[in-house]
C-alpha cells in the first residue's frame, strides 16, 4: 500500500512539475503572435503556427520511458497539439518504440475518422506494447494495453465485420490475455472460412496448436503455410522445429536444410 501511495504521489508531482516547467512554452502555441509591418507603418499581430514536430521531438528527447509517455499524454489531454498532428505523433512514438503511446494516438485518430483501419492499427500497437517483453512492467499498464487493444479490435469489427486482420488481433487477445484458447480457435476457424489464404490466421492458429502441444495438428497447419508461401524460409524453419519437438530428427534435418537452401537462394544472409 505504501509503495502504491508513493507511486501515485510521484506521478502527481511529475505532472505538476511538467506543467509548471515545460508546458508554458507550448500552452499558448496557437495564440503566440509575431509583429509584422503593414502599409502605413502600422504593426499587425500575426499568429505563429503550432509546430507539432518540434513539440513531439522536445517531449521524447527530454524524457524517456514512462516519463515520455506521460508527458505526451498530458499534451494530448490538454489539447496542446492539433488533431491533424496525430500521424506525426504515431510516427515519432513508433520510432522510439513507444507503442502504447502510438496506440493512443491512433485511437484518438480513429475516434475522429470513424474508420475501421484506424481502430485496427491502434489495436495492433496496443497488443504490440503489451507483448513488448519488457520486464517488471506495471500490471495495471499491461492490463490497460490489452483491454484497449481488444476494444479497438472490437470497434474495427463492428464497423467492418469481414476485417480479418482485426479479427486476428481479437484472437490473439482471447488467447494471450483472456486465456480463452477455445474461443480464439473458434474465431480463427471463422476467419479461415472467410479467407482460407490468410497467412496471419494460419500462423496464429499454428502458434496456439504448438502451445497446446498438438504437434501433429501444428504440422498440418504449417503445411498449409508452406503451400501458400513455399519460398518463405520462416515456415520451413518452423516445420523443422516442430519435427524436432516430436523427436523426428530426420524430418527436422530435411526441413532445416531446405530452409537454409531457400534462404541462401533468396540472398538473405546465409552462406
Image: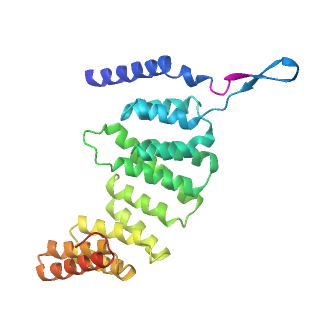
Residue at the location (23% across, 76% down)? Answer: 260
From the viewer's perspective, tell me whether residue 41 is left or right of residue 170: right
Above or below for 186 versus 29? below
Magenta residue span: 29-35
Counting from the top left corner in percent of width and height, residue 136 is at: 25, 38
Residue at the location (35% across, 21% down)? Answer: 10
Foreground: 95 or 128? 95
**Quadrant location of residue 270?**
bottom left
Counting from the top left corner in percent of width and height, residue 144 is at: 40, 41
Above or below for 39 versus 181? above
From the viewer's perspective, tell me whether residue 204 is left or right of residue 259: right
**Quadrant location of residue 124?**
bottom left
Residue that lies at the very extreme toward the right in this rendered image: 40
Residue at the location (24% across, 81% down)? Answer: 258
Foreground: 256 or 184? 256
From the viewer's perspective, tell me whether residue 230 is left or right of residue 270: right
Above or below for 229 versus 115? below
Residue at the location (57% across, 36% down)? Answer: 52
Above or below for 197 versus 211? below
Counting from the top left corner in percent of width and height, residue 36 is at: 76, 23
Task: Check if residue 34 falls in the magenta segment.
Answer: yes
Amino acid at each position: 500500500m505504501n509503495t502504491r501511495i508513493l507511486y501515485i504521489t510521484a506521478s502527481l508531482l511529475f505532472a505538476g512539475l511538467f506543467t509548471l516547467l515545460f508546458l508554458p512554452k507550448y500552452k499558448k502555441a496557437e495564440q503566440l503572435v509575431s509583429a509584422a509591418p503593414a502599409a502605413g507603418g502600422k504593426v499587425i499581430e500575426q499568429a505563429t503556427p503550432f509546430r507539432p514536430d518540434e513539440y513531439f521531438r522536445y517531449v521524447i528527447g527530454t524524457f524517456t520511458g514512462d516519463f515520455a509517455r506521460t508527458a505526451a499524454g498530458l499534451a494530448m489531454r490538454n489539447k496542446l497539439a492539433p488533431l491533424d498532428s496525430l500521424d506525426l505523433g504515431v510516427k515519432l512514438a513508433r520510432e522510439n518504440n513507444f507503442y502504447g503511446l502510438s496506440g493512443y494516438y491512433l485511437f484518438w485518430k480513429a475516434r475522429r475518422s470513424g474508420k475501421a483501419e484506424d481502430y485496427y492499427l491502434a489495436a495492433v500497437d496496443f497488443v504490440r506494447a503489451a507483448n513488448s517483453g519488457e520486464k517488471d512492467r506495471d500490471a495495471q499498464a499491461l492490463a490497460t494495453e490489452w483491454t484497449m487493444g481488444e476494444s479497438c479490435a472490437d470497434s474495427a469489427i463492428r464497423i467492418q465485420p469481414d476485417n480479418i486482420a482485426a479479427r486476428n488481433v481479437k484472437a490473439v487477445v482471447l488467447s494471450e490475455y483472456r486465456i480463452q484458447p477455445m474461443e480464439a480457435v473458434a474465431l480463427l476457424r471463422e476467419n479461415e472460412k472467410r479467407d482460407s489464404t490468410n497467412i496471419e490466421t494460419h500462423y496464429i492458429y499454428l502458434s496456439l496448436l504448438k502451445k497446446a502441444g498438438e504437434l501433429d495438428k501444428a504440422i498440418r497447419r504449417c503445411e498449409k503455410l508452406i503451400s501458400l508461401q513455399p519460398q518463405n524460409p520462416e515456415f520451413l524453419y518452423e516445420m523443422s522445429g516442430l519435427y524436432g519437438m516430436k523427436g523426428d530428427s530426420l524430418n527436422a534435418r530435411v526441413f532445416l536444410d531446405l530452409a537454409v537452401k531457400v534462404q541462401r537462394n533468396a540472398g538473405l544472409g546465409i552462406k
